[in-house]
């Protein structure tokens, strides 16, 4: 008859506890790691794409990479809404070639499309990437844009404003105060009246996390003329923390 002595149990129980602990640790979702990848295809238009990509084949990495590519594509002014970034770049190049063939007498510069991303923040709860794009199809100047992409660090899903901010009216009041403070620190005597085209203060489309605080960014033309460029300010975490749903 098989008999387990008390001494044997004392040895077996800690072993099982350690095994269960290791299994539980291994089953936890590991934080995403990123690498920089670049599109190597040669085009006749000036096209470059250097962007952040989650490493590995986990569900988390796949979801992150899908949402990063989707966000990049949504930022572009492409006539064909494709789901694959390489296909979008090829479509831009083909559009340029068609333009060259149809208007061979036009001596416009080569069209340009440049894409770059930066991992600006990563915690256990949220990942923020800044997506910068520049498109030029002739004319006085190109179109440049910055988009903050906030992702759930555990699932890779996109976090929208309602997922990030609570007490929206109070948060807007705090943001307006810091917007006005940012104008005071500039040397060009800017005033609130110089922005928003005569309308009241409103929050930007782009809100993202950084190491020092929450960054709010208005793109070109969003609140001022093209010459003004980007308008950006930050709210320190010490003041914005009561309004954050994530950290």
Image (cartoon, helix red, strand yellow):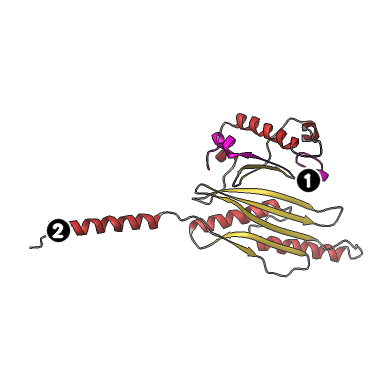
How far is disc 1 from disc 2 in space, using C-alphas? Answer: 75 Å
In depth, the one of 31 and 63 nearer the eye is: 31
Give the side of residue 7 with respect to residue 56, left or right. left
Q: Mark 1: give few (<14), some (14-19) or many (20+) Cα within 10 Å.
A: some
- One can see residue 78 in this view: no
Name which quarter of the figure residue 238 lies in: top right
The residue under the point 81% across, 61% down is 111
Was residue 200 drawn as part of the magenta stretch in this picture?
A: no
Image coordinates for residue 44, horizontal then vertical, percent: 78, 68
Q: Earlier in the sequence, mark 1 or mark 2?
A: 2
Q: Mark 2: give few (<14), some (14-19) or many (20+) Cα within 10 Å.
A: few
- One can see residue 22 in this view: yes
Residue 190 numbered tag: none
The residue under the point 58% across, 56% down is 66
Q: Secondary structure at mark 2?
A: helix
Q: Secondary structure at mark 1?
A: loop
Image coordinates for residue 26, horizontal then vertical, percent: 39, 58
Position of residue 105 relative to residue 60, above or below, is below
**In the current view of this chain or complex, which residue is farthest to the left?**
1
The residue under the point 68% across, 57% down is 116
Nearest to the eye among marks 1 and 2: give it: 2
Give the side of residue 55 with respect to residue 186, left or right. left
Give the side of residue 54 with respect to residue 87, left or right. left
Image coordinates for residue 23, horizontal then vertical, percent: 34, 57
Q: Quadrant of the N terminus?
A: bottom left
Span highlighted in magenta in the image: 221-247
Give the side of residue 169 with respect to residue 21, left or right. right
* Residue linked to disc 2: 7
Image coordinates for residue 169, horizontal then vertical, percent: 62, 29
* Residue linked to disc 1: 229
Q: How many marks?
A: 2
In depth, the one of 228 and 202 nearer the eye is: 228
């Amino acid at each position: 008859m098989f008999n387990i002595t008390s001494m044997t149990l004392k040895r077996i129980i800690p072993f099982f506890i350690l095994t269960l602990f290791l299994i539980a640790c291994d089953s936890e979702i590991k934080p995403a790691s990123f690498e920089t990848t670049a599109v190597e295809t040669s085009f006749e238009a000036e096209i470059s794409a250097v962007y952040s990509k989650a490493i590995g084949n986990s569900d988390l990495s796949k979801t992150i990479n899908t949402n990063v590519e989707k966000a990049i594509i949504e930022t572009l002014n492409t006539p064909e809404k494709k789901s694959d970034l390489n296909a979008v770049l090829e479509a831009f190049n083909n559009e340029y070639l068609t333009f060259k063939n149809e208007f061979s007498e036009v001596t416009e510069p080569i069209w340009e499309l440049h894409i770059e991303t930066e991992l600006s923040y990563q915690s256990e709860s949220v990942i923020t990437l800044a997506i910068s794009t520049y498109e030029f199809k002739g004319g006085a100047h190109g179109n440049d844009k910055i988009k903050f992409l906030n992702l759930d660090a555990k699932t890779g899903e996109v976090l929208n404003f309602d997922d990030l901010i609570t007490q929206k009216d109070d948060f807007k009041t705090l943001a307006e105060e810091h917007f006005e403070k940012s104008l005071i620190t500039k040397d060009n005597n800017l005033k609130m009246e110089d922005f928003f085209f005569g309308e009241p203060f409103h929050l930007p489309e782009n809100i993202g996390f950084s190491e020092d605080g929450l960054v709010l960014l208005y793109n070109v033309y969003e609140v001022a003329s093209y010459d003004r460029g980007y308008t950006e300010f930050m709210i320190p975490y010490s003041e914005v923390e009561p309004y954050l749903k994530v950290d």
